[in-house]
Amino acid sequence: METTLQVLNDLERAGVVSRYAIGGAMGAMFYVEPVLTFDLDVFVVLPQAGGGLLTLAPLYEALRARGYHEEKECVNIEGVPVQFLPAYNALLEEALAEARETRYEATTTRVLRAEHLLAIALQTGRDKDRERVRLLREQASLDQKYLAAVLARHGLAL
Amino acid sequence: MKPMGALRPEVARLLAAKEDRRRTLAGLPYPDKVRAVVRLQRMVAPVLRARGRQVRVWNIKETP
């Protein structure tokens, strides 16, 4: 896992992605108990491509050049299937901009704030997202004022 | 559903202990949680594969 994060940091340093942060179940796990998941969701801000197109193609190409290959919707990076998700709406853009730097053993990484993870789960709204909302409300130390502002800005309600 | 007060005391104790354990797990350092996820993957993968779902257990080196 640490080497996976080092590869992500390398991609950011090389400008392949402008910014990344861990989200999804593995992101939530920074704040709540471990839950079963088989992939690592990584939200990315991509450098603007020609015509304003959001495409993961240059990212996949850079990963292939480093020896990491796609497997269905993920890329296997050092034994971890990583699913890259571009910031496709205002909530995700804000979540990435305000993601927190943290450490995984000796490696610096970035994770979405618990309040944004909760808002994203509310917005996505599948069964597993509703369960994530419940877990975050129960176990994470949420900044309620900050959360209320995020939810209001993006038209969401608990 | 019956309110918690209606539970037999030993059952209430068991449920409270379960909640305590979940809070303890939530407070673990992140690398420990990652190790727990991989253990969960190893336990669940054979069941999911038997149901026809293709899953891959993470192949990562972690210090114990």
Image (cartoon, coloured by chain):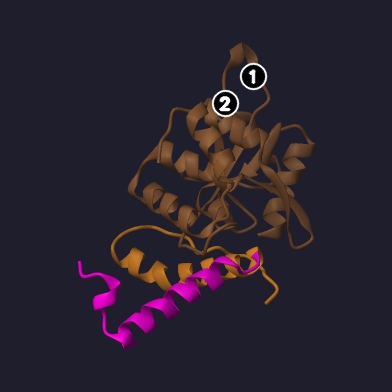
Chain colours: A brown, B orange
Looking at the rendered image, the quarter that the N terminus of chain A falls into is bottom right
Secondary structure beneath dot 1 equals loop
Q: Residue at x 51, y 37 (%)?
A: A148
Q: Residue at x 64, y 19 (%)?
A: A49
Q: Is residue A81 left or right of residue B10?
A: right
Q: Is residue A44 left or right of residue A131?
A: right
Looking at the rendered image, the quarter that the C terminus of chain A falls into is top left
Using the rendered image, report if marks 2 and 1 lie on a common chain: yes
Residue where numbered disc 2 is placed: A55
Using the numbered discs, state the Cα–Cα distance from disc 2 to disc 1 in whole angstroms. Answer: 7 Å
- What segment carries the magenta color? B1-29
* Structural crowding at the residue carrying mark 1, measured as other residues with C-alpha within 10 Å and reported as few (<14), some (14–19) or many (≥20): few
Residue type at numbered disc 2: Thr
Q: Using the image, tell me which numbered label, if any, was put on residue A49.
A: 1
Q: Residue A116: where, in percent of width, then height?
A: 55, 41
Q: Residue A71: where, in percent of width, then height?
A: 50, 47
Quick check: A142 above or below B63?
above
Q: Could you tell me if residue A81 is visible in this image?
A: no
Tell whether position B28 is magenta. yes
Q: Could you tell me if residue B48 is visible in this image?
A: yes
Task: Find out whether the residues at labels 2 and 1 contact each other: C-beta distance under 8 Å.
Answer: yes
Q: Residue A103: where, in percent of width, then height?
A: 74, 56
Q: Residue A67: where, in percent of width, then height?
A: 67, 47
Query: Which residue occupies the foreground of this view, A118 or B61?
Result: A118
Q: Residue at x 61, y 45 (%)?
A: A113
Q: Chain of mark 1?
A: A
Q: Residue at x 57, y 40 (%)?
A: A145
Magenta-drawn stretch, dominant element (helix, strand or loop): helix
Quick check: A68 above or below A55?
below
* Structural crowding at the residue carrying mark 2, measured as other residues with C-alpha within 10 Å and reported as few (<14), some (14–19) or many (≥20): some
Q: Which residue occupies the extreme bottom position in the image?
A: B10
